[in-house]
Amino acid sequence: MLVGASEGWHFYDIWCLVLLSCCVRMLMHQLEKLRQLRNVQEDIAAGTVQMNGRELFLHEPWVFDNTHY
């Protein structure tokens, strides 16, 4: 408990607010990453951007099929 805070904020209350603020920031960061990923996937589906190797393998694996050689 903070000194002189008999009826006001306690140290535990302030600490909980700090932790909650950190959690909210982390969640907002994760949401932004998910939005960016969704936008990239939509752009790939629309054909407006070029796929990298991993995305090409996921969408068109026959490109990497070397069994006919």
Image (cartoon, rainbow, N blue to C red):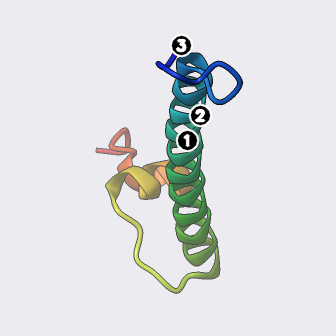
Q: Give the class, few, some or many, for how many residues have Cα within 10 Å of label 1's Cα (few <14, many ≥20).
A: few
Callout 3: SS: loop
User: Relative to residue 7, is residue 63 depicted above or below?
Assistant: below
Q: Give the class, few, some or many, for how many residues have Cα within 10 Å of label 3's Cα (few <14, many ≥20).
A: few
Q: Are marks 2 and 1 in contact (CB under 8 Å)?
A: yes
Which is nearer the N-term, disc 2 or disc 3?
3
Residue 55, quarter of the rendered image: bottom left
As shown in the figure, which amino acid type bears the numbered disc 3? Met
Q: Which mark is residue 17?
A: 2
Q: CA distance from mark 2 to mark 3?
A: 15 Å
Looking at the image, which residue sits at the far right? Answer: 7
> Label 3, on which residue?
1
Q: CA distance from mark 2 to mark 1?
A: 6 Å
Who's the residue at 52% across and 24% down the image?
15
Who's the residue at 52% across and 86% down the image?
48
Who's the residue at 41% across and 68% down the image?
51
As shown in the figure, which amino acid type bears the numbered disc 1? Ser
Which is nearer the eye, 54 or 65? Answer: 54
Residue 56 placement, left or right of 14: left
Foreground disc of the pair 2, 1: 2
Callout 2: SS: helix
Looking at the image, which residue sits at the far front? Answer: 4
> Label 1, on which residue?
21
User: Relative to residue 20, is residue 52 depicted above or below?
Assistant: below
Q: CA distance from mark 1 to mark 3?
A: 20 Å
Give coordinates of residue 26: x percent, y percent. Answer: 50, 42
User: Relative to residue 30, is residue 32 depicted above or below?
Assistant: below
Q: Give the class, few, some or many, for how many residues have Cα within 10 Å of label 2's Cα (few <14, many ≥20).
A: few
Which is nearer the N-term, disc 1 or disc 3?
3
Which is nearer the eye, 64 or 23? Answer: 23
Who's the residue at 40% across and 76% down the image?
50
Q: Which quadrant: the C terminus?
A: top left
